[in-house]
Amino acid sequence: MRPALKALLASALAALAAACAAEAPQSAAPDASGPPPEPPAPRYIEAGLPDLLSDWGQLAAGGGSLVLGEDVTPYDLNTALFSDYALKLRTVWTPEGAGPAAYDPREAFEFPVGTVITKTFYYPRAGGGFERVSRDGVSMAHFDGRALDMDEVRLIETRVLVRREAGWEALPYVWDEDQSEARLSRPGAFVDLVLVGEAGAQRLDYMVPNVNQCANCHVTDTTDGRGVRPIGPKARHLNGDFAYADGVENQLDRWTAAGLLSGAPEPGSAPASAAWASGVPISDLELEAAARSYIDINCAHCHSRTGQADTSGLYLEPWEPAGPNFGLCKPPIAAGRGTGNRLYGIVPGDADASIFAHRMASDRADIMMPELGRAVAHEEGVALVAAWIDQMSGGCG
């Protein structure tokens, strides 16, 4: 990681650490006695706003386990969107007879009416209080293919995307402190946590987005009037192996065999984004693939030619050529304080002079990018993108 960026992040972490754990309220971990529940029966609810997550039958909590419903399929993304170091359990389910989703090589699959997609945000427990959670968790480490080990994690929220006749609807549910149920919270919520890592502990006001903020990210095409739609279930993000309860299998193959997807080619003929979790790859080839995969999943749902940030002239989808529209030597249009007095989005060979790295490293609301979904900077993500910029040749002279 570049010294200047590392110093910036270390300073921010140290300041936050000074106001951290000692002031946080303490509560006991939930009682995990009793056997895990049987897999619930999933339901498609055609209308209305169910108060409880359990109403959907996609997940059931109890006995120290979060159990998937019958025929609910878990999945993961090659590179995940950063959300304050939270881990995510993603699932998809379609009603019997609804038919499979239609494959698309670029956009999110076209799912049938009745589809329910869930994303549960959680953290590994850090010990010393139920509010203390770890920022160093590993995706799927506490999941055995059918259930999440709740003795090891704290559940925060579950977001439900349901495909109704009129289109997709996003519903945020917040987990009770006893971890037995999640309740609908359309206005969103804040959850007080203490985020613990190698550099120490810091207070985290974890934000559950309200329904309007959900739309800010999930309305990925402002031109077709279709509103909210999924972001993650795209061929390039899913084209990789997953450890199911009965073995490891490519996700596109699994979805096809399970009747969830039609029209998908063999995985070797489908697009695949780089799988990156943390750390900076060594070779330049790996570095570029990982950085562009990270930028794709974190930024391109807004920064596309049809997205919410289309007027910026900055387009970050993976097929966009590495030129001015991708930020290289591109002056900002209306970034204001977000520029940090830097002249260009990306200055090849100089991450410190690039607006990209400056905005990613900030946790100030008027500077940071992405502007929603995080309260702290993603240190490893900043380092990845900075290393990619630093190894570029050229300049903006």
Image: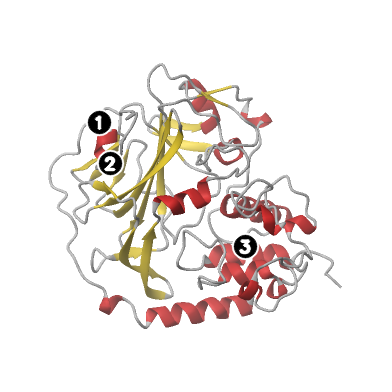
| The quadrant where residue 50 appears | top left
**Separation of marks 3 and 1 at Cα, in angstroms:** 41 Å
Name the mark nearer the viewer: 3 or 1.
1
- Compared with 13, 172 (above or below) is above
x 32%, y 30%: residue: 45
Q: Amino acid at mark 1?
A: Pro
Name the mark nearer the viewer: 2 or 3.
2
Lower sequence index among marks 3 and 1: 1
Residue 371 is left or right of residue 183, and the answer is: right
Give how far across and how far down residue 378 sits, in percent.
52, 65
- Quarter of the picture containing the C terminus is bottom right
**Separation of marks 2 and 3 at Cα, in angstroms:** 36 Å
Q: Amino acid at mark 2?
A: Leu
Residue 335, labelled with which disc? none
Q: Please name the residue that numbered disc 1 is placed on.
A: 40
x 61%, y 61%: residue: 280
x 18%, y 53%: residue: 178
Q: Please name the residue that numbered disc 2 is placed on.
A: 53
Q: Nearer the viewer, residue 257 or 285?
A: 257
Residue 384, labelled with which disc? 3
Residue 184 is left or right of residue 81, and the answer is: left
Q: Nearer the viewer, residue 374 or 255?
A: 374
- Callout 3 touching callout 1 (CB < 8 Å): no
Give how far across and how far down residue 186 sits, in percent.
34, 50
Secondary structure, mark 3, is helix
Give how far across and how far down residue 372 sits, in percent.
49, 60
Secondary structure, mark 2, is helix
Question: Would you call the spot at circle 3 few (<14 residues within 10 Å), some (14-19), or many (20 or more)?
Answer: many
**Residue 62 in view (yes/no):** yes
Residue 240 is left or right of residue 35, and the answer is: right
